[in-house]
Amino acid sequence: TQLLEQSPQFLSIQEGENLTVYCNSSSVFSSLQWYRQEPGEGPVLLVTVVTGGEVKKLKRLTFQFGDARKDSSLHITAAQPGDTGLYLCAGGNQGGKLIFGQGTELSVKP
Amino acid sequence: EAGVTQFPSHSVIEKGQTVTLRCDPISGHDNLYWYRRVMGKEIKFLLHFVKESKQDESGMPNNRFLAERTGGTYSTLKVQPAELEDSGVYFCASSFYPGQKLFFGSGTQLSVL
């Protein structure tokens, strides 16, 4: 059974601080996706990484896929209150089925 | 373009009753997925349709759950009879190709009392 361990589960920081969220697995995934979910809504895809060692940037967000395609990280620089939300990592395989991590509830205080 | 729509947004039923959830995927998306998040747990895969065929139903918890996608358009997920542990948020998602960008609906919050 494939599992994704996501940490930390909760994170409360001040505006302007940096943070990193981690997703780790003992399994290899063909892709790793990061989602953001707002209350009452479904997850919305932020980025997909598919190559070992790949780094993608989305404004102040930096996503990295581990060399062995078993782990990934999301780094936010100078967090803003608008970054508050639930962040989810999900590992994908060829069939399209996703394995989700438990999620990181991020709160950025002004 | 309309996104993935789910109905109802909330459902409160008693143990032993039947509930049917509906999902309308984005038009043209052959791939339709059902996922579920129970309290305190991660979102878990239930099943995957390609058009009207069940491609993967390995995540369906038991035979009280029945998913259909007649005609390859909208899908329904019926729980009969519902049990307390079925409570959670049921998400539907669709994509053009399997493994490509998934578009999620807002989910159905199911509470079984």
Image: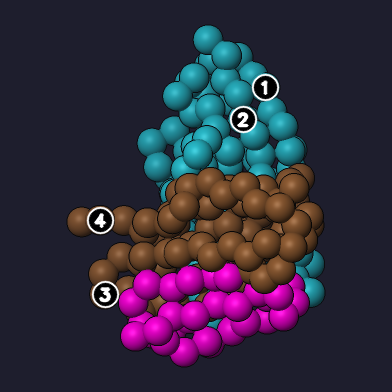
| Residue at the image position 59 percent from the left and 62 percent from the top | B19
- Same chain for labels 4 and 2? Say yes or no: no
* Callout 2–callout 1 Cβ contact below 8 Å: yes
Element type where label 3 sits in the image: loop
Image vertical order of residue A82 relative to residue A39, above or below: above
What label sits on residue B28 in the rendered view? 3
Observer able to see residue A64: no
- Same chain for labels 1 and 4? Say yes or no: no
- Pointer 2 residue: A106
A29 relative to B105 in the view: left or right: right
Residue B22 drawn at (x, y percent): 45, 64
Query: Alpha-carbon distance for marks 2 and 1?
Result: 6 Å
Question: Magenta segment, which residues?
Answer: B49-78
- Report the amino acid beneath label 3: Gly
- Pointer 4 residue: B2
Image vertical order of residue A76 relative to residue B45, above or below: above
Chain with brown colouring: B
Residue A70 drawn at (x, y percent): 69, 65
B54 relative to B89 in the view: left or right: left
Query: Alpha-carbon distance for marks 1 and 4?
Result: 35 Å
Question: Mark 2 Cα within 10 Å, few/some/many (few <14, many 20+)?
Answer: many
